[in-house]
Amino acid sequence: MYEDIPKSNPLKTILIVLLILIAFAVIGYFIFKSLYPKKSSEVVTFPSSLSLSPSPTTSAKFSPSPSLLTSPSPSATPDYKVPTGETYVLAQASDTNGDSKDETLVVTKMQSGKYHVYVLSSDGNSVFDDKTLDRKPVRIATQTYDATKESYLSWMLIFSENSGDLAFVHWNGTKYEIPQGIGI
């Protein structure tokens, strides 16, 4: 009675089942990626010394994680002493003069369209002030200005990534300055 039914090859059956499983896995992967987009493009990490503050020129990106949706309390926002009529752009804190206390470099935009760069000491006093910056830095980094002569970190204002278009705010041992020939 069963002799009329064609016999199937078990290897062929296993191959068909594997192809079906692989097809389901690929379809499932694409569905997963469309429902849960890559989080690295949504969450920006900052150095621990950088304090976050809202910037009027950036748009907020939220992650589905509820812990990232909570806003900091107003008391956690540092006082950058932004002058009246100016808008906060960037800031970074770092020990740049060797006193083991963090100084803060702040960049604000003035109503004239130029940018104001100033350094606040650890106790909040202004120790450097320059209002001649004509363009907005995309980020602030720290590095030693001239490693052959000093060990102090300097702030590097980067105007365009990977271009060498930058300026330093540098501690020369007695005061902050923008070194001649490099910068603004």
Image: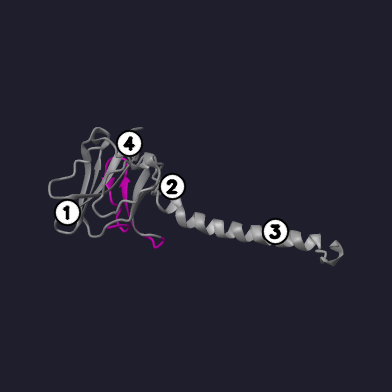
Separation of disc 4 and disc 1 at Cα? 25 Å
- Place of residue 45 in the rendered image (x, y in percent of width and height, measured from the top left): 40, 46
Image vertical order of residue 137 relative to residue 121, above or below? below
Which dot, 2 or 3, sits closer to the camera?
3
Q: Main secondary structure of the magenta part?
A: loop
Q: Which residue is mark 4?
A: 102
Figure quadrant of residue 113: bottom left
**What amino acid type should be assigned to the residue bearing mark 4?**
Asp
Pointer 3 residue: 18
Pointer 2 residue: 147
Label 3 and label 4: CA atoms lie apart by 60 Å
Of the residues shown, which amino acid type is indicated by label 3? Leu
Which of pointers 4 and 1 lies earlier in the amino acid sequence? 4
Q: Secondary structure at mark 3?
A: helix
Q: Earlier in the sequence, mark 2 or mark 3?
A: 3
Secondary structure state at the residue bearing disc 1: loop
Instruction: Decide whether residue 26 is among the magenta residues.
Output: no
Amino acid carrying label 2: it is Ala
Report the span colored magenta: 162-184
Q: Assign a secondary structure to mark 4.
A: loop
The C terminus: image quadrant: bottom left
Q: Which residue is disc 1 drawn over?
A: 110
